[in-house]
Image (cartoon, rainbow, N blue to C red):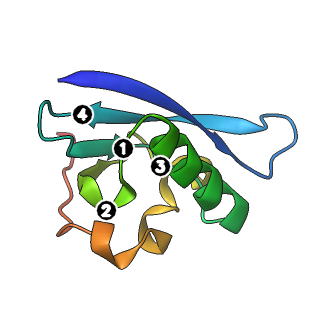
């Protein structure tokens, strides 16, 4: 498994972007997407471009991981293409 960073544009001037990570399973190319960014059209587009630039296909997402629920890290998941929406689960830290 390898971890690849993708800069995702966000409309918060003080930040400009957040880092998403693709945890890629080799050799299949499927991946887990960590902190996919914000529910914002330009951000979703920049995430897709960034994944494709790394040779990944957005529809090969197997799961999403959100490290914490801030709008700039978590809200892109529902807007991702339908082909890339695996069943959702949630985990709670105890």
Relative side of 72 to 76, left or right: right
Q: Are circles 4 and 3 on residues that touch, CB within 8 Å? A: no
Q: What's the distance in space between the residues labelled 4 and 3, CA to CA?
A: 14 Å
For the residue labelled by badge 4, is the local secondary structure a helix, a strand or a loop? Answer: strand
Q: Which residue is mark 4?
A: 24
Question: Quick one: label 4 or label 2, which is nearer the N terminus?
Answer: 4
Task: Mark 1 vs mark 3: give the one in front.
Answer: 1
The percent position of residue 71, horizontal first and vertical second, equals 60, 55
Q: What's the distance in space between the residues labelled 2 and 1, CA to CA?
A: 9 Å
Task: Mark 1 vs mark 4: give the one in front.
Answer: 1
Q: Are circles 4 and 2 on residues that touch, CB within 8 Å? A: no
Q: What's the distance in space between the residues labelled 1 and 4, CA to CA?
A: 9 Å
Mark 4 nearby-residue class (10 Å; few <14, some 14–19, many ≥20):
many
Residue drawn at (14%, 30%) of the image: 26
Residue drawn at (38%, 56%) of the image: 58
Q: Which residue is mark 2?
A: 59
Query: Hey, which quadrant is residue 81 in on the image?
Result: bottom left
For the residue labelled by badge 1, is the local secondary structure a helix, a strand or a loop? Answer: loop
Q: Which residue is mark 1?
A: 56
Q: Which residue is mark 3?
A: 36
The percent position of residue 87, horizontal first and vertical second, equals 17, 70
Q: Are circles 1 and 4 on residues that touch, CB within 8 Å? A: yes
């Amino acid at each position: 498994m390898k971890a690849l960073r993708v800069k995702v544009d966000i409309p918060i001037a003080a930040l400009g972007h957040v880092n998403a990570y693709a945890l890629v399973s080799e050799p299949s190319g499927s991946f887990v997407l960590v902190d996919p960014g914000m529910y914002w059209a330009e951000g979703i587009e920049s995430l897709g471009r960034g994944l494709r630039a790394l040779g990944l296909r957005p529809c090969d997402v197997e799961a999403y991981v959100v490290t914490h629920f801030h709008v700039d890290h978590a809200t892109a998941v529902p807007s991702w293409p339908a082909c890339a929406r695996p069943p959702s689960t949630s985990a709670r830290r105890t």
